Amino acid sequence: MLSNASEQLQKLIESPVFLACVFSWLCAQFIKTIIKLFSGNVHSLRELFELLLWRTGSMPSSHSAITACLSTSIAFRSGINSDLFILSFVFYLVTIRDAVGVRRANGKQARRLNEIGEIIKEKGLVSDFEKLKEVNGHSPMEAFVGSLLGFFIGIAFSVL
């Protein structure tokens, strides 16, 4: 049983689709980090590692990159008429809609509510105000560039 699980894990790790997706995510995070570094927006080593590994928002969208790469890789391997491609493409569209629409709007709302909360706290109307987390969504351009990155990485892994 254990050897079967390790064989399955090895097949996953060796899968061109999986490798393409991981590579597209890493590339997007790396590019995002480089842009932040050159614009002077990285203030600590911890922030640098967070940007490289996990932080959301900014250019390019890693969500867009990984889902575009997934969809592109599946299109090359299974064809655009396959149910798997259609599933991955719809997943891509939902992800982009969420990143550009819902998460972006939530971030703007949280930012404004935090500003209002600070004003109310300064006026002494509340004694304790806990800030909301400001989730970073993406601009349409960030999602577009991430999608292009994922698309080209998906092609590269599919033709190699």
Image: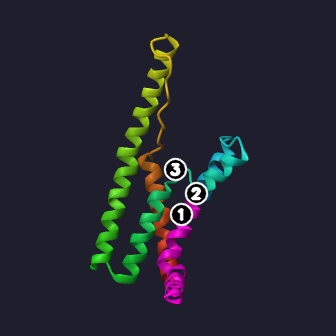
Marks 1 and 2 in Cβ contact (< 8 Å): yes
Task: Report the Cα–Cα distance between label 1 and label 2.
Answer: 6 Å
Alpha carbon distance from label 3 to label 1? 11 Å
- Residue type indicated by callout 3: Thr
The tag on residue 113 is: none
Q: Position of residue 75 (x, y in %)?
A: 37, 77
Could you tell me what secondary structure mostly forms the magenta stretch?
A: helix
Q: What residue type is disc 2 on?
A: Gln
* Picture layout, residue 5 above or below residue 137: below
Q: Nearer the viewer, residue 127 or 44?
A: 127
Q: Which residue is mark 3?
A: 56
Stretch in magenta: 1-28
Location of residue 44 (image quadrant): top right
Residue with the mark numbered 2: 29
How many neighbours does mark 3 have within 10 angstroms: few (below 14), some (14-19), or many (20 or more)? some
- Amino acid of disc 1: Trp
Residue 149: percent from left, percent from top:
50, 63
Q: Circle 3 sits in a helix, a strand or a loop, which is it? A: loop
- Is the image coloured rainbow, by chain, by secondary structure, or in one colour? rainbow
- Per the image, the residue denoted by label 1 is 25
Q: Nearer the viewer, residue 121 or 153?
A: 121
- Quick one: which residue is furthest to the right in this view? 45
The residue depicted at 70 percent of the width and 40 percent of the height is 43
Q: Is residue 6 magenta?
A: yes
